Image: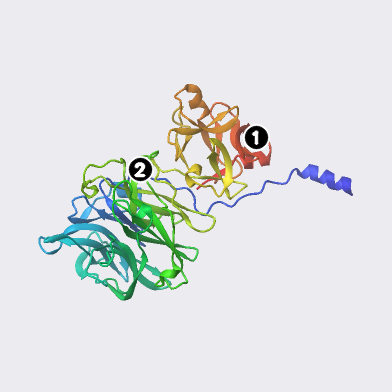
């Protein structure tokens, strides 16, 4: 009997390699920046199939809207001015941080504005739009959102948790030597809060108090029964960054004790990618609805002459937001201009991603920092028809094979490096929904993992082919 079992095993062959499920959130790629000279960006995906985009213009004098069926399409979409500042009195200066929302069949734009006789008397206001297309809607002013004080207030955002609509915003407490804190209240209607607001966050950490003591620009994303609120901190120069608050969606959100605040920033300037002062973000979703997208502004240079508010070059950018195994968002780093990077997960080890570690390429789970596992798929260094994989956090460094081991190394400009760092992108050898990378200069050899390290090898078995198959995420 034992001989028969052994013979049957030989005839059938080795057991097939374990297969990972196709990722729920496949790769998306955008080209940054989305819009020059547009700060405090807000992108809203509506049920009509359009993305609606609004942002602060550097003249601080009007509210603009664009729409397109894709996020990238917003780059070239026609821009329409839907409202212009008043010539005198309130709403006559510093038109800042508009957001567009669709509530109960109507459009609403939340924005901040000063007055012509006091440009720093910043308060929050609401416009209501009637019509299916907000670019051509009839807009009416609903007036100021009244809060607990008549003080500097801005950056209103609205969201719903368990059927309850909330407003969050930034405001100065007149009794405290801060610029702004983050507040939360329930809403009676889209332009009126109800009940007593609660303070969710006050700038106390060193990274929240550079230049100014600021918590502002709240933005909410929900996932896995959790509510996450990002916010911006410090002055609007290269010190600007994002912090994060979190709470259970089932908790009383008006109880400050139910919110947890990160002790470190979650998104900061990055000199390697030439991105400075990332902040005032919003969230949207990809065209297929399967990926969360981080929307934010930053600058491409660090040093600013004069007041940062007078520098017009904040620009709108987007990149995919990833999620850690514990269910919390991983913002990564503000990626370089140009095509956004992606991650490559193993076909047969679903939780492991290609990453570099001390410049050696391997597959690993729970990669930290995230950017070690992000690569830009660019035109191959040897030319069109091929690809190269450029590191997200070490621009100019590429995956290349050396003695058939895969390393991350800086492009030295030689023909040898270009050949070693160039691959043919093939349909996944174990699943056509995946991807495999064949060596440019060693035909028949593919990037595969072996004992979790990446090699360039010839393949012969089903396991080999599984080890050489990856999913773009």
Residue 176 visible? yes
Looking at this view, name the residue that lies furthest to the right: 1
Does 252 sit above or below residue 16? Answer: below
> In this orientation, which residue lies closer to the viewer: 173 or 101?
173
Residue 287 visible? no
Residue on which the image places disc 2? 275
Q: Which mark is residue 197?
A: none
Q: Which mark is residue 459?
A: 1
Q: Secondary structure at mark 2?
A: loop
Q: Are marks 1 and 2 in contact (CB under 8 Å)?
A: no
Q: Where is residue 35 shown, x and y percent of the image?
A: 29, 47
**Residue at figure coordinates x 40%, y 38% from the top left:** 272
Q: Earlier in the sequence, mark 1 or mark 2?
A: 2
Q: Real-space Cα distance between discs 1 and 2?
A: 41 Å
Does 398 sit above or below residue 355? Answer: above
Q: Where is residue 238 shown, x and y percent of the image?
A: 32, 46
Residue 447 lies left or right of residue 461; in this view the side is left
**Crowdedness near tag 1: few (<14), some (14–19) or many (≥20) residues, C-alpha within 10 Å:** some
> In this orientation, which residue lies closer to the viewer: 160 or 264?
264
């Amino acid at each position: 009997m034992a001989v028969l079992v052994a013979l049957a095993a030989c005839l059938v062959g080795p057991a097939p390699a374990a297969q990972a499920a196709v990722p729920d959130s496949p790769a998306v790629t955008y080209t940054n920046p989305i819009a020059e000279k547009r700060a405090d960006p807000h992108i809203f995906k509506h049920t009509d199939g359009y993305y609606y985009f609004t942002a602060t213009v550097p003249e601080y004098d009007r509210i603009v809207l664009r729409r397109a069926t894709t996020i990238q399409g917003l780059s070239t979409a026609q821009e329409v001015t839907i409202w212009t500042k008043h010539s005198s009195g309130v709403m006559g200066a510093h038109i800042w941080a508009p957001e567009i929302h669709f509530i109960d069949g109507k459009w609403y734009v939340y924005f901040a504005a000063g007055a012509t006789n006091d440009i720093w008397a910043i308060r929050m206001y609401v416009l209501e739009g009637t019509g299916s297309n907000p670019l051509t809607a009839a807009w009416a002013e609903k007036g100021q959102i009244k809060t607990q004080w008549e003080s500097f207030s801005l950056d209103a955002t609205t969201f719903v948790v368990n059927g309850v609509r909330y407003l969050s915003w930034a405001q100065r407490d007149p009794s405290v030597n801060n610029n702004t804190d983050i507040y939360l209240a329930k809403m009676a209607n889209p332009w009126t809060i109800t009940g007593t607001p609660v303070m969710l966050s006050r700038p106390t950490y060193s990274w929240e108090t550079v230049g100014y003591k600021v918590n502002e620009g709240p933005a909410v994303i929900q996932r896995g029964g959790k509510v996450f609120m990002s916010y911006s901190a410090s002055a609007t120069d290269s010190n600007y960054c994002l912090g994060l608050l979190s709470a259970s969606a089932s908790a009383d959100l008006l109880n400050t004790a139910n919110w947890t605040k990160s002790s470190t920033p979650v998104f900061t300037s990055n000199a390697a990618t030439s991105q400075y002062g990332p902040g005032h973000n919003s969230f949207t979703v990809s065209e297929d609805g399967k990926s969360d997208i981080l929307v934010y502004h930053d600058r491409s240079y660090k040093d600013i002459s004069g007041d940062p508010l007078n520098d017009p070059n904040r620009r709108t950018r987007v990149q995919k937001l990833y999620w850690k195994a514990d269910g919390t968002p991983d913002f990564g780093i503000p990626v370089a201009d140009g095509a956004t990077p992606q991650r490559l997960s193993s076909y047969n080890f679903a939780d492991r991603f290609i990453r570099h570690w001390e410049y050696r390429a391997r597959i690993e789970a729970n990669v930290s920092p995230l950017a070690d596992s992000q690569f830009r798929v660019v035109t191959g260094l040897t030319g069109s028809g091929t690809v190269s994989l450029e590191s997200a956090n070490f621009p100019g460094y590429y995956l290349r094979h050396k003695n058939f081991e895969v390393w991350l190394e800086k492009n030295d400009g030689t023909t040898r490096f270009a050949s070693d760092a160039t691959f043919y992108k093939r349909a996944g050898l174990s699943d056509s929904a995946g991807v495999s990378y064949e060596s440019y200069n060693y035909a028949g050899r593919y990037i595969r993992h072996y004992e979790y390290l990446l090699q360039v090898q010839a393949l012969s078995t089903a396991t080999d082919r599984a080890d050489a198959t990856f999913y773009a995420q």
